[in-house]
Image (tube, rainbow, N blue to C red):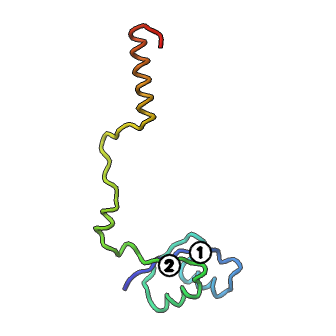
Amino acid sequence: MSKVVIRQYKSAIGQKEAARQTLESLGLRRPGNTVVREDSATLRGQIRKIAHLVEVRADRREQDVEVEQERRAEPKATQAAPKKHEAKKWQRRQKAAEAQASGSPS
């Protein structure tokens, strides 16, 4: 069976007792909590009861692993190129050091 990711995005304050109990049975305690459950008819019924409080998605972890690996960023090189503002600072320091070495004011 497939898995379903359930995320609570709205508080249960002011909701009916049945909705609060359904959230509790799913393991959702506060907005922002996420649980992963096996998809079943029972679960779908519970979700229907609290659909206005939760967001439901398919579990991404079951998708093809190659796709996930393609999305990952390439490993960074050992020596990263300096950022623009860092390069300018370095150039100013080099010029100041050269001017000081030659004895002329900058």
Residue type at mark 2 is: Val
Q: Quadrant of the N terminus?
A: bottom left
**Dot placed on the residue nearer the N-terminal end, 2 or 1:** 1
| Residue at horizontal 32 percent and vertical 47 percent from the top | 76
Instruction: Give me the residue at 43% from left, 85% from top.
Output: 39
Label annotation for residue 56: 2
Instruction: Using the rendered view, name the quadrant where residue 61 is placed.
Output: bottom left
Element type at marker 1? loop
Q: Which residue is mark 1?
A: 29
**In front here: 34 or 81?**
81
Foreground residue among 29 and 5:
5
Residue 9's quadrant in the figure?
bottom right
Q: How many marks?
A: 2
Q: Answer above or below: position of 8 versus 100.
A: below
The percent coordinates of residue 32 (x first, y second) are: 56, 69
User: Residue 7 or 67: which is nearer the viewer?
Assistant: 67
> What amino acid type is highlighted by mark number 1?
Arg
- Decide: is 36 above or below 43: above
Could you tell me residue 87's position as x and y percent?
Answer: 41, 32
Residue pushed farthest top? Answer: 103
